[in-house]
Image: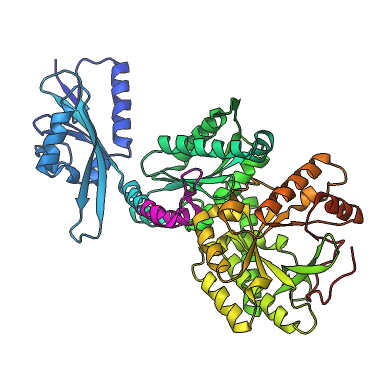
Amino acid sequence: MKEKRRRAGYDTVAMSKAAVATLSLEASVFEACPDPLAIFEAGGRLLAANSAARAEGAPDPAGAEEPLGQLLPFWAEADTRDRLLAAALQPDGASNIEVRIDFEDRTRSKVFWVSARRLGEAEPARLVASARNVSVAHALTREVARIETLVATQASRDPVTGFVIRAAFQELLEKAIEDANRARHPLALLFFDLDDFKALNDTHGLAAGDEYLRRLGEALNAARRPGRVFARLGGDEFGLLSPETTSAEAALEADNLVRFLTEFSPTFEGRKLQITASVGVAVYPAHGQRASDLMLAADLAMHQAKTRGRARFILHDPTARERERIGLLRGQADRIRTALSAGRFVPLFQPICEVSTGRIVAAETLVRLREEDGSLTSPDEFLDAAERFGFVTAIDRVVISSTFDALIAARKRIPPDLEVSINLSGLDFEDDALVADISRLARLKGIRPSRITFEITETAALRDLGRVQDFTGALTSEGFKFALDDFGVGFSSFRYLRDLPMSTLKFDQSYVRDLPHKMENRVFVRGIAEICRGFGVKTVAEGVETQEIMAILRELGVDRAQGYHIGYPALELPARPGDPA
């Protein structure tokens, strides 16, 4: 029977129409595969190569008699070729043999994983080989190793989960985007938030929450694929960087992550700990070409997943509505930039009194943006954009300097022992120059450090506990003080009183306002106040709006109070001790 040659490497001899159709489909799949594929004889004669292989240097397969070493650039070295052939002829074949190709300029290289196996038992033996360009993942793995070295020496890893912290993660993301742009590969960024993690803490205790996170870190790190990087971005927010990942692959990865977290249920003291997660997915370059834009897109998608019912993933959809929101944030960022240049961020001061006497002993600095018409805008209106676009530290520097200036201006009319507290963002701890600048500014303006307390939240501390310890330790050694703010929201761990030099703990107003109606809030506040006394830490209740709450705070042993009942925020520091509240 006459032999018909349909395609190099494929013989169709007395085939049925169905068989020919199947073979045609297989040939189409072979040709369309995005990874280089080649079929050859064991002696080296090339039978077929797909378009991806030809793009990497394989000759046209029609009648090619090239030796194996010349088929593709990454098989050029004899030792690699021999190792591949020997393994391919074994029953299990060759799998993920790593090969590096250095370009002549030595500034670039490609890394491939090559696999090959025998096709059937026919003689002469035929082999099929595939190669995957893993240059981006390989480069990112090296970068991860570099970051891990820094982690070991600079405490840049989250101590509970073992994931990298936000600063290191953002650095890795920026590097990954550079590599992806150079290689013209996509990459995916996943943000995921643990649903009802606070409820887990409230129900089972803080130790259970820490144990859940520790076990989660172990499980995800153990299952982590090469090149993937997990990060802890906040208390219960995490990130996953996935190089060389398309939108479809990212959606599958996100779905697997949702399923994994839904089924993940470690036990603690005989109790099963089980919650879900909401995942947001953004893909480079479709959803952003800068790290900040990609993180914004993933964050927006994650919050969409939460609002749509949780325990699901959302792939960022740059629809008109989302573009409008991103445009709004960019508009706010421009407004912030202009306000910083024009000096329109101003401090207000809210008084803080002793609960036992009602005497005003301190004030908290609250920042406002003065609009062009003279009105004052609350941080609620601009903080999100400030954090997303990196203006927070610049604003905090202005607030610190303005507070010091206010103390100097009011020196003759305020008590000499009046203390002032200033809020710091978690991003401030990533500014390596801020500690020295605060110290220098205080000396220059003649501010006694013991009058200044910097307030930080648990979420801020979680960004990078090592950096926070260095930051707080350096300023504490000069006499500055620190307060743990918004206690009772989120994670409420005494670990921070042990690991950080806190002189004050501030109860979140959500606990304080309900003191008249909720006995459990009274038990919580009384217990924490007693523990703080044992640590030598003062307690402050925020959100005090009535005389009834003041009376309860005296009964519970809280040291200080702040809220509208004590005084409203004002442009000037409180000038004299107040009357008993």
Q: Position of residue 106 (x, y in %)?
A: 20, 59
Is residue 146 found left or right of 295 in the rendered image? left
- Figure quadrant of residue 208: top right
Kindly report the secondary structure that dominates the magenta region of the rendered protein. helix
Which residue is drawn at the image coordinates 22% and 24% (left, top)? 92
Relative height, residue 88 to residue 227 (above, below): above
Q: Quadrant of the N terminus?
A: top left
Q: Is residue 199 visible?
A: yes
Towards the viewer: 208 or 460: 208
Q: Magenta residues, as a range? A: 146-175
Quarter occupied by residue 91: top left
Looking at the image, residue 360 sits to the left or right of residue 23; the answer is right
Count of marks placed on residues? 0
Q: Classify 349 as above or below 560.
A: below
Q: In the rendered view of the protein, which quadrant contains the C terminus?
A: bottom right
Q: Nearer the viewer, residue 224 or 482?
A: 482
296 horizontally vs 246: left or right: right
At which x and y percent is residue 169? 46, 53
Residue 242 or 27: which is nearer the viewer?
242
Report the residue at 64% width, 69% height from top.
336
Q: Residue at x 56, y 53 (%)?
A: 499
Rendering coords of residue 97 (x, y %): 22, 37
Residue 350 seen from this side: no
User: Which picture quadrant has residue 401?
Assistant: bottom right
Q: How is the image coloured?
A: rainbow
Using the image, determine if residue 544 lies above or below residue 56.
below
Q: Does the magenta portion include 139?
A: no
Residue 158 is a magenta residue: yes
- In the rendering, at what x and y percent does residue 215 appear? 50, 35
